[in-house]
Amino acid sequence: MADALVIGAGIGGLTAAAALARRGWKVTVCERAASIEPVGSGLAIAPNALRALDTIGVGDRVRELAALQGVAGVRRPSGGWLSRADVEAARARYGDPIVLLRRATVVDLLADLLPSGALRLNTAVRDVDAASGRVTTDAGELRADLVVAADGIRSAARRALFPGHPEPVYSGVTSWRLVVPGGGVSAPVVGAESWGRGLVFGVMPLAGDEVYCYATAAVPAGRGHADPAEEKAGLLRLFRGWHAPIPELLSRADPAGIVRSDVFFMDTPLTAFHRGRVALLGDAAHSMTPNLGQGACQAIEDAVVLAHLVDEGGSVEDALAAYTRDRLPRTTAIVRRSASINRLTRLASPPAVFARDTMLSLAGLTGPSAALRQADAVFNWWPPAS
Ligand SMILES: Cc1cc2nc3c(=O)[nH]c(=O)nc-3n(C[C@H](O)[C@H](O)[C@H](O)COP(=O)(O)OP(=O)(O)OC[C@H]3O[C@@H](n4cnc5c(N)ncnc54)[C@H](O)[C@@H]3O)c2cc1C
């Protein structure tokens, strides 16, 4: 039995570990944190990632536990629609809609697929040797036939394997994520993003009467408040006067549950997603802005493609070269597209916002399927047949 060592138990690392274990690899996952409880927020899983999750046997569980987004689209701060698509049209086009669930639910489903004893918490990886597959951790040295570096946007493995490659850059926006109770809200909770001047507010219904909200603002990095109550007060000020139920949802937020993070992304793609026996995956390989809701979805795609390729029978090095050929062009295009939407959301001057909104509403006038067609290149992806 071949050995795989996965660095990082985020969504990318857990999916890779599950996909490899399913194919008979002996898997060890080293996670530096003491637990794998993710930040309290929601996660959109698009049809492409649902198909990938089907290959490891959890696609249907995700569909069951998720809230299906009734309508998705872009609104003005006043509530008027700039463009919209609906769940049935998405299902007809892609076989599935985008589904929404708590991030912790996805992590739990994936973690349940790991063989017992595979996950080693409190185990930080300190060094990786690409040629031999030797990994130095806090708890000693390990060796594996395949090392999967899924250690996130600040990946130390990426720095070690591609020294001098530019670090992720600030996207120009900071983000907030929160989950609030949705019961009894005075206006319908409709899944949508609302775009203002340099501001975005997303409302996404979750199963169980909860609502996942996220927001972005075009502000310099590093301006977060140390006091959660101040953070909440700042958000309420930013979105005062926006359409219902945004201010009401915000007023329900537990300040301690608001997660603020400055958004960075890799605007210079790597030249490869592998070196020797090490594959980079997820945010470690191609961190992107959240505008397409594809960061975790692409990590999931990476993981199932990688597991398929290393199971083909050739050498690990050849399989990883094929992994780069498969994943680098697709993820690079998605990183770029996401960044260009990010630029649109940062526009703040009235003439630029007017031009942007006119463009969006003209595109919307051609009907909901026009909005969906935009997503074809991302959602029309199928995992390799095994
Ligand atoms: C506001 C916002 C909203 C988003 N919404 C969506 C969405 O709706 N849909 C979507 O698909 N994506 C979304 N994303 C993107 C998504 O969150 C990320 O792309 C995804 O979580 C990346 O997963 P990962 O496993 O690659 O990395 P991570 O989740 O960052 O996991 C990396 C793991 O590695 C561990 N680690 C790091 N270094 C070491 C080490 N040396 N040794 C051991 N362990 C280590 C870390 O502790 C961590 O657990 C969003 C992002 C943001 C900012």
Image (tube, rainbow, N blue to C red):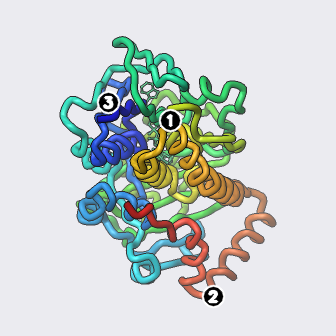
Residue 294 visible to an observer of this rendering: yes
Q: Which mark is residue 366?
A: 2
Instruction: Quote the CA–CA distance across marks 3 and 1.
Output: 17 Å
In percent of width and height, residue 307 lies at 40, 47
Q: Amino acid at mark 1?
A: Gly
Instruction: Quote the CA–CA distance across marks 2 and 1.
Output: 39 Å
Note whether 85 is above or below 167 in the view shown: below
Q: Which residue is mark 3?
A: 28
Note whether 14 is above or below 122 in the view shown: below
Label 3 CB-ligand 1 distance < 8 A: no
Label 1 CB-ligand 1 distance < 8 A: yes
Q: Amino acid at mark 2?
A: Thr
Q: Secondary structure at mark 2?
A: loop
Residue 83's image quarter? bottom right
Q: Which mark is residue 152?
A: 1
Instruction: Choose mark 2 or mark 3, whichever is in front.
Output: 3
- Residue, far bottom: 366
* Mark 2 or 1, nearer chain start: 1
Residue 187 visible to an observer of this rendering: no
Residue depicted at 38% across the width and 52% down the height: 42
In percent of width and height, residue 376 lies at 56, 73
